[in-house]
Structure formats: structure tokens, C-alpha cells
Image (tube, rainbow, N blue to C red):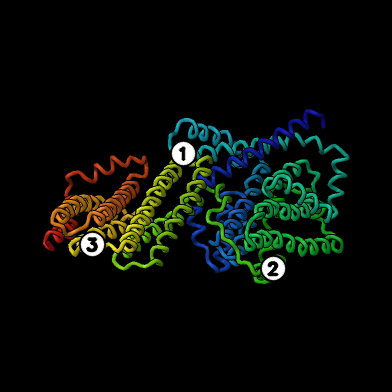
């Protein structure tokens, strides 16, 4: 083997790892909604968790990525440790798909059908389709599909280059001696663990082993312990990701490590007993690419069969390793581990923004309550909600900025932009709630009172604002387009109601029914209530037009003379405007 063969091997390895990384990331983006669906189906049922782990890992081709996400879910309180154990076990089985794909390169035979099954026969076609999708299609999904095909093509070319560059090792005595040394099960496990820990991918290290097996010098007796060690080495990613997390997330990472270490110890013991007592001929035979894929799958399935019934014991073990303390766990609102999975990250941002919206709406309704039933506790509660929405805006906004630097699909980029806009509206709604509470505080501290007609009018506009808050929250949280369309007609009614109430207030001032000082407070209240409805209108328009964020176009369309708009406007006008006139 010359220096040029070594350089070729390095180049092939780089292409292989690059192709696997590109393909995995594109698969993750392309299957974003499916990933959310699978993760949303998690239950305490062992089978459901197991198949969820298998499904997600089969999609993204990386048990390490799945386990890192699991650590993030546990750290955020979205998944219990019991659920995480089952998912991690499933992920170990799902990761074996890559070895089966790579084993296609070992197909032998001169028949046309067998030749077509070889990756190097159909990979150029996939590369051609991939480059067309990537360069000439504007759709984000087609771009991702192109990246998947291109990543697979680069991966397979890298595998072919590695296989060709190591072919000369078949005649090198030192290489043969190296794998004779690895026939020692413990050394084989150590070699597999170290290699996998270095490249942080068991799928990639199995691929490298398959490339070396093409020399015919790798026996099953040497390959099986290496495969066992690879399962231990892949745990390094989850262990590193657990640094800085809460205790339960650390336990989830330790479950991954404990599962693979215990499984390796048990089955390595069985392997060694069989090897040194029965000495089966299979262990001395040269391993094939498909044989390594079989061994990889068989080992992971065997570990799962062994430990799945004892998952509760694994849970007890990690609780011993990471014991409970008096201080409770702090849950991460938006875990940065989700940045590697934009669809999951956006789902978490949406959930937190929904909490923010409900908190902002509650701040306004509680502040309105303080106007008629004042209490210091009520004002304090409104202030706490306003501070909470400020915190939400900082957390979600910073997280979305980080997420935007990742490679997002068009739909994900649109969703991120929508959320950035909406959290600003929610924060301003809470600010108006605080302003209303401060107005109530001013009325109470200065012993000011509103006239009966002013109290009646306040009840009318407050009811309309409370209703529009409910519609806006429902439109965003449930993506309810009907509620979004109902928002604008009601906002127009509130605008007209505000103008009428201002005119009524001027009349009362002229007649001496209201004080000037109380009038300033009244004017501030009308402004805050009307501006709250404006932000609700923005939220509804954003929901209706999330694709391009053209809020002014959506508002114009909602205000046009369509039958729907006129019907809803008439209903709200009769409910608030005509009722207010009748009361007078």
C-alpha cells in the first residue's frame, strides 16, 4: 500500500463522512413534520416508545441525533425518563438501517438485475436527479430531496473509493496481524469504541468496517467485538450533550451508555464462551458487507430483547448514579439541542409563544377586573404576568435568531418570521394590560371615581376587548382561521366604540359629570384598550397571511365589502354599538 493509497483512503473517508452528514441533515429537514408527529406519539407504553425511537432514527439515520433530542426533551420536561429509555432502545435498532444500505455494495453476480442493485450502478442516476432538484427547483422540499440524493451519492462514492484504496491491504501481512490482534474480544471492543467516539457516529464506523472487510482479512471473530464496541463509542455524543442539563437529562444520557455497556458485557461474555469452547468455523471466516450488517442488527436487537423487560431496573440504576437532591430540577424552556432539528425547535417555540399569548391576554383581563374590583394583589398579579411576557419575548426571540442561522426550509423560515412578529404583539398586549392596571391603581390611590355612564361604557368596550383577545389567542394557538377572520370586524367595532366613548366623555366634561383628572385616566384607558385590539388584529392577519407576512394586504382583504366581513361586522355592531346607544 503506497502513500497514494493512503491519500486516496483519506479522501474517500472524508467524502463518506461528508455525504452521511449532508444526507442526515437533509433527511431531518425533509421529514420535519413526520418527526414532530412521531415524537408527539410518545407514551409510557414500551412498544410505542420502542417503535418511535426506531422510526425517528431510521428517518434521520443517526441514533446519536435521536438520543441528543431525547436528552433535550427530558431536559425540557416534555418526556419522562421512563419514556426516554424505550425510545433510546428503539434508536439503537433504527441506526442499523445504514449498514444494510451500504451492504448493497457487496452484491456479486453478472446478471443484469444484480448489477443494477449495486449502488455504483444507480448512484449516478440519483446524483443527476439530485443536482437537478437542488439547482433548478425553487421548492424547499425539492431542494432538500436533492440534497438527500446528492448526500447519498457522495456517501456511496466515498465508500467505493475507500474500498478500492484498501484493496492492496489484502496482501499486507501487518494488516492481517492487526485483525488477528483484534480477534481478542476486549481489544476489538476497545478499538470499535475509540473509533466511534472519535467520529461520533456508529453508522459511519460500521461503514468503515465494511470497507475494510472488502479486503477479505476481517473475520467475523474480529468484526463482532468491534461492532459491540461501536455501540459504546456512539454514546459519547449524548454524554457530551448532557453537560449543563438537569438531573433527569443526565440520567437519560446515562441510560444510553448503561444500555450499551450492559448489553456489550452480557453478549461479549456469551461470544467469548462460544468462541473459546465451541470454536465455530464462522468466526474464522472472512466477513462480508451483508454479514456485518446482519451482525450489527442482530446485536442491537439482542440487547433490546435482553434489557427491554428490565427497563425499570435501568431506571433505578441511573437514579443511583445520579441521585436526587433537595433542590428541584430546573426545566429548560427552549433547549439548544433542538436547534439541530428545526421542525422540533419551531414546535417548541410555538408552544412557548402560545403560553405567552395566554399570559398576555390574562394580564389584560385581570387588569380590567382591577378597574371595578381593585386590589393590590390583582395589580401585582398583572405586573408578574407582564414581566413573564417580557421574559418570554427575550427567550423566544433570542432562540429564533439562533435558529434562523440554521438551514431552514421555506415553510420553517416563514414560521420563524411569523413567531418573531407575534411575540412582539403579545408583549405589547401585556404592556397595555400593565398600563390599565396602573390606571386602576391611580384611580384607587387618588380616590377618583368614574360616573355611572362611564362605568357602563367601560363595561361595553372591555367586553369587546376581552372577546377579541379570546379570538386572537384561539386563532394563533389552534391556527383557527375562522377566529382570525372574525377578529378584524370586531376590531373595527372597537375603533368606532372608542371614538363614541371619547365624544360621550367630552359631553360629560361639559356638563360637569366627570372631573378633568379622572378624564385623563379615562382617555388613557380607551387608548390602551383600543391598541390592545389593534395588536389582536395584527395577530389574526399574521395567522391568515403567514407565508409572506404581508399584514396590510390581509387587513385590506378582511375589510373589503365581502359578505362575510359585513355579516360579522353587523353582528358585533349590534352587540356593542347599538347596545351602547340603547343604554343611553
For marks 3 and 1 on the same chain, the one whose residue lies earlier in the sequence: 1
The residue nearer to you, when weighing 271 against 10, is 10
Q: Which residue is mark 2?
A: 323
Tell me if residue 215 can be seen.
yes
Q: Position of residue 333 (x, y in %)?
A: 53, 56
Q: Is residue 467 left or right of residue 105?
A: left
Q: Is residue 63 above or below residue 24?
A: below
Q: Is residue 409 left or right of residue 315?
A: left
Q: Position of residue 436 (x, y in %)?
A: 33, 57
Tell me if residue 485 can be seen.
no
For marks 1 and 2 on the same chain, the one whose residue lies earlier in the sequence: 1
For marks 2 and 3 on the same chain, the one whose residue lies earlier in the sequence: 2
Q: Is residue 572 left or right of residue 198?
A: left
Q: Nearer the viewer, mark 1 or mark 2?
A: 2
Q: Nearer the viewer, mark 3 or mark 1?
A: 3
Q: CA distance from mark 2 to mark 3?
A: 60 Å
Do residues under tags 3 and 1 come within 8 Å of each other at their CB atoms?
no
The residue nearer to you, when weighing 82 against 10, is 82
Q: Where does the C terminus fall, quadrant-wise?
A: bottom left
Q: Which residue is mark 1?
A: 142
Q: Where does the N terminus fall, quadrant-wise?
A: top right
Crowdedness near tag 1: few (<14), some (14–19) or many (≥20) residues, C-alpha within 10 Å: some
The secondary element bearing badge 2 is classed as loop
User: What numbered label is drawn on residue 450?
Assistant: 3
Crowdedness near tag 2: few (<14), some (14–19) or many (≥20) residues, C-alpha within 10 Å: few
Q: CA distance from mark 3 to mark 1?
A: 62 Å
Kindly identify the residue that appears in the image at 52 percent across and 47 percent down.
399
Q: CA distance from mark 1 to mark 2?
A: 48 Å
The secondary element bearing badge 3 is classed as loop
Q: Is residue 442 above or below residue 309?
A: above
Figure quadrant of residue 433: bottom left
Amino acid at each position: 500500500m503506497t502513500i497514494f493509497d493512503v491519500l486516496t483512503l483519506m479522501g474517500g473517508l472524508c467524502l463518506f463522512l461528508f455525504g452521511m452528514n449532508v444526507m442526515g441533515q437533509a433527511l431531518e429537514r425533509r421529514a420535519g413534520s413526520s418527526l414532530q408527529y412521531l415524537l408527539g406519539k410518545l407514551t409510557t407504553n414500551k412498544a410505542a416508545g420502542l417503535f418511535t425511537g426506531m422510526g425517528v432514527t431510521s428517518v434521520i439515520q443517526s441514533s446519536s441525533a435521536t438520543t441528543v433530542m431525547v436528552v433535550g426533551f427530558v431536559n425540557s420536561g416534555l418526556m419522562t425518563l421512563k419514556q426516554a429509555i424505550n425510545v433510546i432502545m428503539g434508536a439503537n435498532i433504527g441506526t442499523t438501517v445504514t449498514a444494510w444500505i451500504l451492504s448493497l455494495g457487496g452484491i456479486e453476480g453478472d446478471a443484469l438485475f444484480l448489477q443494477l442493485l449495486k449502488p455504483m450502478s444507480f448512484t449516478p442516476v440519483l446524483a443527476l436527479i439530485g443536482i437537478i432538484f437542488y439547482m433548478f427547483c425553487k421548492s424547499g422540499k425539492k431542494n432538500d430531496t436533492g440534497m438527500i440524493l446528492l448526500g447519498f451519492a457522495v456517501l456511496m462514492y466515498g465508500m467505493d473509493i475507500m474500498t478500492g484504496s484498501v484493496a492492496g491491504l489484502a496482501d499486507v501481512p501487518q494488516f492481517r496481524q492487526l485483525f488477528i490482534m483484534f480477534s481478542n474480544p476486549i481489544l476489538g471492543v476497545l478499538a470499535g469504541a475509540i473509533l466511534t467516539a472519535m467520529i461520533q457516529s456508529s453508522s459511519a464506523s460500521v461503514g468503515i468496517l465494511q470497507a475494510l472487510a472488502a479486503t477479505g482479512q476481517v473475520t467475523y471473530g474480529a468484526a463482532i467485538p468491534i461492532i459491540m464496541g461501536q455501540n459504546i463509542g456512539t454514546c459519547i455524543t449524548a454524554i457530551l450533550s448532557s453537560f449543563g442539563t438537569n438531573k433527569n437529562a443526565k440520567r437519560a444520557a446515562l441510560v444510553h451508555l448503561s444500555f450499551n455497556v450492559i448489553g456489550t458485557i452480557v453478549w461479549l461474555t456469551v461470544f467469548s464462551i462460544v468462541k473459546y469452547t465451541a470454536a465455530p468455523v464462522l468466526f474464522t471466516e472472512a466477513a462480508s458487507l451483508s454479514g456485518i450488517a446482519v451482525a450489527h442488527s442482530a446485536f442491537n436487537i439482542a440487547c433490546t430483547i435482553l434489557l427491554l423487560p428490565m427497563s425499570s431496573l435501568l431506571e433505578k440504576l441511573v437514579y443511583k448514579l445520579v441521585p436526587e437532591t433537595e433542590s428541584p430540577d430546573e426545566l429548560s424552556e427552549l433547549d439548544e439541542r433542538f436547534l439541530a432539528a428545526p421542525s422540533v425547535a419551531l414546535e417548541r417555540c410555538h408552544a412557548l409563544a402560545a403560553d405567552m399569548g395566554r399570559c398576555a391576554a390574562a394580564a389584560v383581563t385581570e387588569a380590567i377586573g382591577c378597574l371595578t374590583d381593585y386590589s393590590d394583589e390583582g395589580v401585582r398579579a398583572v405586573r408578574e404576568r407582564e414581566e413573564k411576557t417580557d421574559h418570554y419575548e427575550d427567550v423566544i426571540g433570542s432562540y429564533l435568531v439562533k435558529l434562523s442561522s440554521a438551514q431552514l426550509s421555506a415553510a420553517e423560515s416563514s414560521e420563524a418570521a411569523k413567531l418573531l412578529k407575534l411575540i412582539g404583539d403579545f408583549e405589547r398586549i401585556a404592556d397595555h394590560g400593565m398600563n390599565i392596571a396602573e390606571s386602576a391603581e391611580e384611580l384607587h390611590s387618588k380616590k377618583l371615581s368614574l360616573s355611572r355612564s362611564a362605568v357602563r361604557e367601560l363595561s361595553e368596550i372591555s367586553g369587546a376587548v376581552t372577546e377579541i383577545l379570546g379570538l386572537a389567542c384561539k386563532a394563533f394557538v389552534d391556527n383557527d382561521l375562522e377566529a382570525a377572520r372574525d377578529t378584524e370586524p370586531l376590531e373595527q367595532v372597537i375603533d368606532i366604540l372608542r371614538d363614541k366613548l371619547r365624544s360621550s366623555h367630552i359631553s360629560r366634561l361639559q356638563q360637569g359629570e366627570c372631573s378633568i383628572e379622572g378624564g385623563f385616566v379615562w382617555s388613557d384607558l380607551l387608548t390602551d384598550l383600543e391598541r390592545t385590539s389593534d395588536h389582536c388584529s395584527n395577530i389574526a392577519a399574521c395567522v391568515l397571511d403567514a407565508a409572506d407576512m404581508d399584514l396590510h394586504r390581509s387587513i385590506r382583504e378582511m375589510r373589503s365589502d365581502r359578505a362575510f366581513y359585513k355579516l360579522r361586522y353587523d353582528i358585533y355592531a349590534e352587540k356593542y354599538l347599538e347596545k351602547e346607544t340603547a343604554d343611553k
